[in-house]
Amino acid sequence: MSNLVYKSAEAARGIEAQYRRVLEQWPVPKAELQVPTRQGATFVLVCGPEGAPPVVLLHGAQANSASWMLDVALWSTKFRLFAVDVIGEAGLSAQVRPELGGDAHALWLDNVFAALGLSRAAIVGTSLGGWLALDYASRRPAAIRALALICPAGIGRQKNFLLKAAPLLLLGPWGRRKMRELVFGPAPRTLPEEVRPLADLMEGVGRAIKPRVVKIPQLTDTQLRRLDMPILTIIGGRDVLLDSRNTTERLQRVAPQAEICFIEEGYHFLPGQASRVMDFLERHISSCRD
């Protein structure tokens, strides 16, 4: 794996091995695919009933498809899930990071959809994955049945978190822990045993990967108005990376069909949303077959 994404080749190998061990605990039967795309091989986990309405899952930055492990047991009862490892992140897809400002990621998703035999699908995306979903929907609206977005980038203003985080990085392990708490919220005192391998993986990714230090493109009002598909947006009032109030204001103004769940005490990490997303998907795509 290229050092474009990881701090070292050793770190990349360690995360890949740890990720593969975590995937052994995937809670439902699954298939693992490597599909060819113009950006290189893309890893996809597939689960749920064949012929059920398709839902593509796009995780956030500094993550991989293990992010969905606490959600897929519920969603896969009604939907055919395709959890895609985003290129240039800590998964098993190509370690390339094309510019976010062009159409490279949309063309990549064209290839992914084609390889999976999908003409239309719903997308669930979180953070950077939410931006990928929005960008794709704005360019390929006919391909998208519905969008369920958790703390999505690309709508509200991106905050300058590095300005706040830089002093903490000088304070060693304590500073890094405080920085994580600002993003993810206070860590629980104890973790259930079945969650610990996933938590350890995500902590390891945070140490091993090179973060994307980029400004994520915002969709214009015109682009947002074109999104006429059902939209669910779940956002946190304490998000230090994105301006959730600006996200709310823009959606209410230019995409009034969007359902907005504003969690006042929520951070950029919003666990426990599986039932809310399931309800949305059942209402909007449960009768679709594609």
Image (cartoon, rainbow, N blue to C red):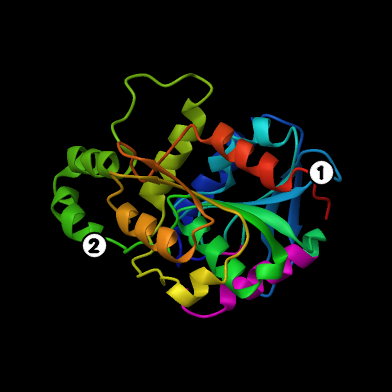
- The residue under the point 65% across, 36% down is 72
Bin the neighbour count of mark 1 within 10 Å (Cα to Cα): few under 14, some 14-19, many 20 and up.
Answer: some
Q: How many numbered markers are drawn?
A: 2
**On the image, which quarter does residue 105 sit in?**
bottom right
Can you identify the residue that label 2 sits on?
160
The stretch in magenta equals: 94-114
Bin the neighbour count of mark 2 within 10 Å (Cα to Cα): few under 14, some 14-19, many 20 and up.
Answer: few
Q: Could you tell me residue 125's position as x and y percent? A: 55, 52
- The residue under the point 34% across, 24% down is 188
Of the residues shown, which amino acid type is indicated by label 2?
A: Asn
Q: Could you tell me residue 202's position as x and y percent? A: 44, 41
Residue 96 is tagged as none
Please say whether residue 72 is visible from this viewpoint. yes
Residue 52 is tagged as 1
Assign the C terminus to one quadrant of the image.
bottom right
Q: What element carries label 1?
A: loop
Residue 223 as seen in the image, left or right of residue 216: right
Question: Which numbered disc, 2 or 1, marks the residue that appears first in the sequence?
Answer: 1
Residue toward you, 90 or 146? 146
Mark 2–mark 1 distance (CA, rounded to whole Å):
41 Å
